[in-house]
Amino acid sequence: MASGKNELAISELLHNLQVEVSSVHLTHVSLDWRDSDYTPDFNKLYFILDGEGWIRIADKQFHPRPGQLCLMPAYVNQGYSVVSDQPYRKYWCHFTTRTGSFDLFQWIGVPFCIDVQDPDKITRLFEQLIEPSGSSPIVTLIRQKAAMLELLAAYLEQVPVQVLQHRNEEIKRLNVIHDYVDKHLQSSVSVDDLASLLHLHPNYFIAYFKKHFGISPLKYVNRKRIEKAKTLLMTSAHNVKEIADLTGFADTNHFTKFFRKETGFSPTEFRAIYG
């Protein structure tokens, strides 16, 4: 499993996760289903119902069995083929999970094929992906995204998650930023301060941070301030002015306006509902 620090960093990335489903079907593949060498720019999930075949992910080959769910991550060389006159019947979907300029599975590594603990649940989620119900196109799209997220959650809760080795440096950098911001929320936190932690020029730091983590540094700091303010409103006896001070806002007015903009509630309303 990822370490506590790394899990925290991955959680930060998930705040900006954008999920898009491009294709989803239930298919009985043909006997000419094969490709020995290609690299997709999307992730794939296969839920095998019956039949035989093989898939290759990087240098690892698998022969998925009925009842298995397989994840084939984006930007990894792959192949697949039938092996007999009983080709696969499978649910499958193509999707992306963007966090900034990268896909989630460019950050984390997981086992590629697993035995499903609840096949009925996976079947139901794929059916919801194929035919999401809704009273409008907006509702339908939201329900499809919800089903995709639930499918990903069902996969990830069964497997160990590791930060990919070549991403360790970025995760360490995010942890440095996270620790500094947490310790200095009460005071002013500038881009120059954060850039100096990583020994980067401020202009380069802004571009680097947004590319890797999907949010600007100042938006990240403000999000952390709002998160802390919510916690204090729910769990402490501090008044609104004290919470504004503890989260780095110069005055209560600014804090109240910003809090309402981010949450839809004033601090007092939020405390009345959730405190």
Image: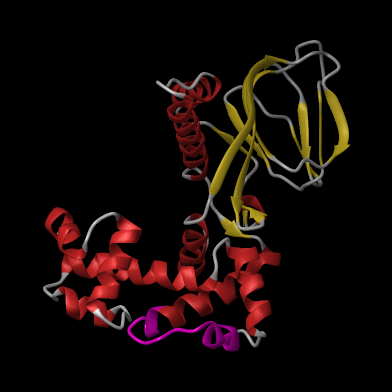
State the residue at coordinates (50%, 55%): 14
Compared across the picture, whether 238 is left or right of 249 comes to: left
Measured from the top left, where is residue 8 in percent x and y? 46, 65
Q: In which quarter of the image is residue 222?
A: bottom left
Residue 27 in view (yes/no):
yes
The colour scheme used to paint the residues is secondary structure
Q: Which of 12 and 261 is in front in this view?
A: 261
Measured from the top left, where is residue 180 in percent x and y? 45, 83
Q: Main secondary structure of the magenta part?
A: helix
Compared across the picture, whether 83 is left or right of 158 comes to: right
Q: Quadrant of the C terminus?
A: bottom left
State the residue at coordinates (88%, 33%): 36
Q: Nearer the viewer, residue 163 or 251?
A: 251
Is residue 183 magenta-colored? yes
State the residue at coordinates (17%, 73%): 240
Measured from the top left, where is residue 170 in percent x and y? 63, 71
Measured from the top left, where is residue 167 in percent x and y? 66, 66
Vertical arrangement, residue 184 with respect to residue 73, above or below: below
Vertical arrangement, residue 250 with respect to residue 54, above or below: below
Q: Which segment did they paint magenta?
A: 182-197
Compared across the picture, whether 121 is left or right of 213 comes to: left
